[in-house]
Image: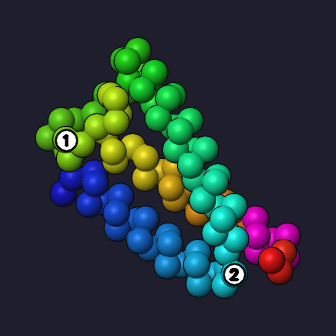
Amino acid sequence: MNYLLLNLGFMLIAFVILNSFVRKTPWRVVLWTMISMLGLTLIFDNVIIALDIVAYDPTKVSGIYLGLAPIEDFAYTVVAVLAVSSIWHKMTGNKK
């Protein structure tokens, strides 16, 4: 199993659980947060890979790259944005 399949499974589970946990997720805010965080992830992941701080097993990545970063590296950002925004929305009691 490669990283992409593993990440897609976790992202699907996170989306289903968090979306059922928070019925009225503010998707417009989540989308803008997602775009911002993915942009920052793109920049900083490429930096740490270029500096040889992180390396990936080429047999386990899909071969799809954004710069030096494999596409699988962005799954953590997606799950984090979904989780934090859903939990924040639920905890603050926003009804929007």
**Neighbour tally class for label 2: few under 14, some 14-19, many 20 plus, Cα within 10 Å:** some
Residue occupied by mark 2: 24
Give the main secondary structure, helix, strand or loop, of the magenta stretch. Answer: helix
Disc 2 marks which amino acid?
Lys
Query: In the image, 44: left or right of 81?
Result: left
Q: Is residue 77 magenta?
A: no
Query: In the image, 87: left or right of 94?
Result: left
Q: Is residue 56 above or below residue 12?
A: above
Q: For numbered disc 1, what is the local secondary structure? A: loop
Q: Quarter-wise, where is residue 94 in the image?
A: bottom right
Distance from Cα at disc 1 to Cα at disc 2: 36 Å
Residue occupied by mark 1: 63
Q: Which residues are magenta?
A: 88-93
Q: Residue at x 43, y 47 (%)?
A: 74
Q: Residue at x 45, y 31 (%)?
A: 45
**Neighbour tally class for label 1: few under 14, some 14-19, many 20 plus, Cα within 10 Å:** few
Q: Quarter-wise, where is residue 91 in the image?
A: bottom right
